[in-house]
Amino acid sequence: MGGIDWQQELTRAALPHAVLALLMSAEMHGYAMIEVLRAGGFPRTKGGTLYPLLRRLEEQGLVSHVWQHDSAGPGRKQFAITGEGRADLVRAADAWQQMDDALSRIRTSRQETP
């Protein structure tokens, strides 16, 4: 009997905000983001997941990109967080904290109930 794969569900929910958090520290291209995300606790991150997500974040005005041309290879998109992306990241952090608080209250109240 299978249950919910909570790790996968939470990773899916957190990935957009993990990307925004990455971009708070530096502009990055997609491949570099994948490597950092994998090392930072998102081991299943693949290009087929990240690039459509970056496109959606850009459509929402949360990230932007510029083409970076390199004489050693093909050009690539360099992504940066926008002001709206920064504001969204703050809202997301608040929402995650509220959810964590709610889950803690539920666990605590259930432990106190006989």
Image (cartoon, rainbow, N blue to C red):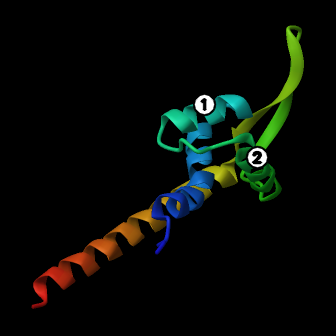
Q: Which quadrant of the figure contains the C terminus?
A: bottom left
Residue in the foreground of this view, choosing between 62 and 101: 101
Mark number displayed over residue 48: 2
User: Which residue is depicted at the point 39% across and 64% down?
Assistant: 97
Could you tell me how many numbered marks the image carries?
2
Q: Amino acid at mark 2?
A: Gly
Quadrant of residue 87 within the rendered picture:
bottom right
Q: Secondary structure at mark 2?
A: helix
Mark number displayed over residue 35: 1
- How far is the residue under mark 2 from the one under mark 1? 14 Å
49 relative to 30, above or below? below
Q: Amino acid at mark 1?
A: Glu
Q: In the image, residue 47 lies at what x, y percent?
A: 74, 41
Density class for disc 1 (Cα within 10 Å; few <14, some 14-19, many ≥20) is some
Looking at the image, can residue 16 be seen? yes
Quadrant of residue 72 within the rendered picture:
top right
Specify whether 94 is left or right of 35. left
Q: In the image, residue 23 lies at what x, y percent?
A: 62, 38
Looking at the image, can residue 25 be seen? no
